[in-house]
Amino acid sequence: MSVVSGEAYGSRSASVDAEQKSTSGGLLLNQWFPALLARVGAWLSDLTGRPFRFRSTVLVVRHSHVLELLSRDLEFQIAPVNASRIAAVNGAFILGMDRGEDLTRERGALYRALRAVDMDALRAGAEDRARLRVDAVSDGSIDVIGEYARPIAAETAMALFGVAGPDPRRFAEVARAIFAHTFLNLSDDKVIERRAVAAGVELRLWLRTEIARRAALPHGAATGGRRDLMGRDLMDGLMDARVTGAALDHDTVRRLLGGMLVGSVDTTASSVAKIVAVIARDRRLAADVAADVEDPDRLRGWCWEALRRWPHNPILLRRAAVSTQIGGTRVAVGDTIVAWTQAAMLDKSVFPSPSELRPDRPREPYLHFGGGLHPCAGRAVNDFQIPLLVGLLVRRGIGSVKPIRWSGPFPDHLELRFER
């Protein structure tokens, strides 16, 4: 039986309709208002050359200052921002840890296990599933999120992490409920928290059951029934001391898997939805992307540029551990530091002619997936899966899209009509 109710951001609700009809909710869920704010912020920051201070909050806008903030991780910490929420749902995870022995040990083990995964096979599986869904469209339209990006991302995640849950839909709902609280519940909404805790119980059960099953297999036996699909999944790698360089106990394996997978579905779905919406509403851009759809590097460049126009996540948060300054602005102990990454990616000193979308820009300055001590651990999958999903839609011919419908902070439905 499922522990989480269907209201855990799994479907659209009356409360979401009310939120979108309100002035603040509707503006913040709209592409144009945050983009306008980001342009104004970048312009003001260019004039002043400094971050902005509002009482106990410091808003960091210039690209160089954002990079400085992320690099000074002993002074500007992440644990006070989200460690308690992550721990309550999943147990400690590296995205809630500041620099130290635990972070070094667990991140090292995780990255070594990731390198052991056959990413080419994982990519091929995602492409096959995506192609089947696009080819199956008979009426000329598809829900880019609910029928396409979200279930495919869930299936990719299930293959990568080695845990399935009852089905891809349930897997995606549990991941969304946990993600909503651990990374987005800045107001500490208790309803969102209760949903996440319940989802965490369900996720723990899935992971513990599969880890115990694999631990009981004869040494060298195929694990998870996936040897023929992708060689070695992440659970398999984390349980193998030859891969990680250290013997991890089962609860550490569970925590690492649970922490990784919560952002694996909706990060992809949100990014694909916003990229497609940006492309579909700009005829010249759509033509340029279509012309480059067979060039993987340029297609990826177009995706990151479209996402720069409408990021899946426009800010990163840190908390000041010491009294200091950044970019000439005073910072006090306990201040909240907001890295406004959407505005930073409009910094003309790094992105010349920032309003133009150019697929050949250098990759390093993009801030879509974090940076410094805490880049997104799943960026290797994002790097192939997001352009792959966008590219198949472009090949079919993106005609028009309706406005995105939302479930809380998540894009939940985007109807796309193909040209052919």
Image (cartoon, rainbow, N blue to C red):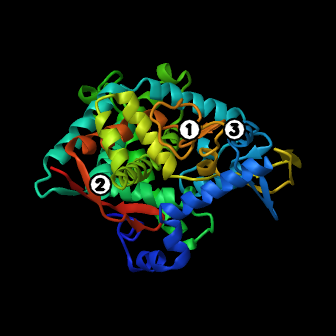
Distance CA(mark 3)–CA(mark 2): 33 Å
Farthest top residue in view: 242
How many labels were placed on the picture? Answer: 3
Crowd band around label 1 with a 10 angstrom C-alpha radius: few (<14), some (14–19), many (20+) = many
Residue sitting at x 57%, y 53%: 314
Residue 391 visible? yes
Label 1 or label 3, whichever comes before in sequence order: 3
Instruction: Give the labeled residue for mark 3.
Output: 67
Distance CA(mark 1)–CA(mark 3): 11 Å
Q: Where's residue 303, x and y in %?
A: 41, 41
Q: Which mark is residue 366?
A: 1
Crowd band around label 3 with a 10 angstrom C-alpha radius: few (<14), some (14–19), many (20+) = some
Q: Quadrant of residue 232?
A: top left
Q: Quadrant of residue 39?
A: bottom right
Distance CA(mark 1)–CA(mark 2): 24 Å
Q: Callout 2, which amino acid?
A: Val
Residue sitting at x 49%, y 53%: 310
Q: Which mark is residue 144?
A: 2
Q: Where's residue 285, x and y in %?
A: 37, 45
Q: Secondary structure at mark 1?
A: loop
Q: Callout 3, which amino acid?
A: Leu
Residue sitting at x 73%, y 51%: 45
Q: Secondary structure at mark 3?
A: helix
> Relative to 381, does residue 266 appear above or below in the rendering?
below
> Relative to 244, does residue 351 appear above or below in the rendering?
below
Crowd band around label 2 with a 10 angstrom C-alpha radius: few (<14), some (14–19), many (20+) = many
Q: Nearer the viewer, mark 1 or mark 2?
A: 1
Q: Secondary structure at mark 2?
A: helix
Label 1 or label 2, whichever comes before in sequence order: 2
